[in-house]
Amino acid sequence: MELVLNTFGTSLTKDNDCFVVITSDGKQRIHPEGLKTITISKGAQISSDAALFAIENEIEVLFVDQSGKPSGRIWSHKFGSVSTIRRGQLDFSFSPEAVKWIIEIIGIKMENQQALLLSLTASTSFAEELVKKSVSRIEDYRKKVSTTEGEVISDIAPTLRGWEGAASKTYFECLNGFIPEEFRMEGRQQHPATDITNCLLNYAYGILYGKIEGALIRAGVDPYIGIFHRDDYNRPVLVFDVIEKYRVWADYVVLSLVMQKAINEDCYSVRDDGSFWLEPLGKRILIQSFNDYVDQVVTLRGIARSRNSQITLYAQELAQIFKNFA
């Protein structure tokens, strides 16, 4: 379970063996059992007693910015990387095995994009042809990625980024053709977003960043030692690598919300510079929809588990790979 505090003026304290959420509407007691993460947005606050109580119960406290991306976290001293995993992680990142790993990750991302496009309901022959051509074009890029050869990541990184970017451009252009007109994107944009769909995507990716970073930390993997993404100083670049495997989950949730027209003008604001920002109602709808989606149990490798558990298990697999590589 995740506790999200994203309303201005909300505070979290501790009383005896429970957390207490204090809002303008009153107080709510929450027992720590089953609670895994506490997410706090700007304008909300947590007391030192509550923070220490979270640490004692091995509950991570995640602070996020206005776009939903993690800006800091508190976690138990029981989390963290052991030296053998860190050494192996560094050695792995400069090995031919890292080349195979990132090729597989990018290939999975493209396959996920194709699957989502194929799930769209084409009501016209034009829409059906758009999906067909887009899936075929992404397949061409996927095959190019799969046959790329190199001894280390730096040998192939520019080529992979080019094909990955071209495939994503094709993917979002196709998605845009199915989105209701009032939600159409002006191309894929990061921050600041100048339309509501890009704003939703950015925030959903931020939620996913937080979940992946937390899973890596708990598994003992250092999120700051990247494999494909290496150039960003003091940023959790391994998260940027791993997220590609799961990014389609955020795409699906956002696509579902805009297709259902579940987002209205009360959910966001537009600043003087034309940038779109989610308001508390919009954040609440998106966060709840995303958490409901990742809590769903699906079958993977013949085993039924939640999508959240899949991230946790993959982080543990990575830790084992790195440990064995040391």
Image (tube, rainbow, N blue to C red):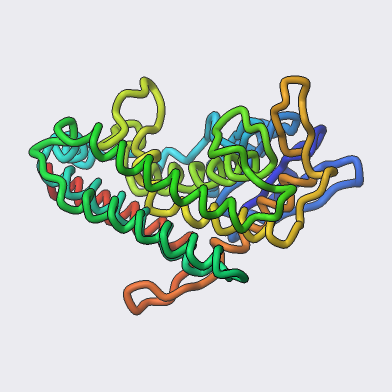
Q: Is residue 44 visible?
A: yes
- Is residue 214 shown left or right of residue 292? left
Is residue 172 shown above or below 255?
above
Q: Is residue 290 visible?
A: no
Residue at the extreme front of the image, as rendered: 125
Q: Residue at position x 54%, y 49% from top?
A: 57
Q: Quadrant of residue 66?
A: top right
Nearer to us in this view, 215 or 294: 294
Q: How many marks?
A: 0
Residue at the extreme bottom of the image, as rendered: 302
- Is residue 65 shown left or right of residue 239? right
Q: Position of residue 125 (x, y in %)?
A: 55, 69
Q: Position of residue 59 (x, y in %)?
A: 54, 47
Q: Position of residue 220 (x, y in %)?
A: 32, 44
Q: Residue at position x 14%, y 50% from top?
A: 324
- Is residue 324 shown left or right of residue 202? left
Is residue 273 shown above or below 175?
above
Q: Residue at position x 54%, y 35% from top?
A: 70
Q: Quadrant of the N terminus?
A: bottom right
Residue at the extreme right of the image, as rendered: 25
Q: Quadrant of the C terminus?
A: top left
Q: Position of residue 63 (x, y in %)?
A: 60, 34
Q: Residue at position x 49%, y 39% from top?
A: 75
- Is residue 75 shown left or right of residue 178? left
Is residue 249 shown above or below 276?
below
Nearer to us in this view, 72 or 126: 126
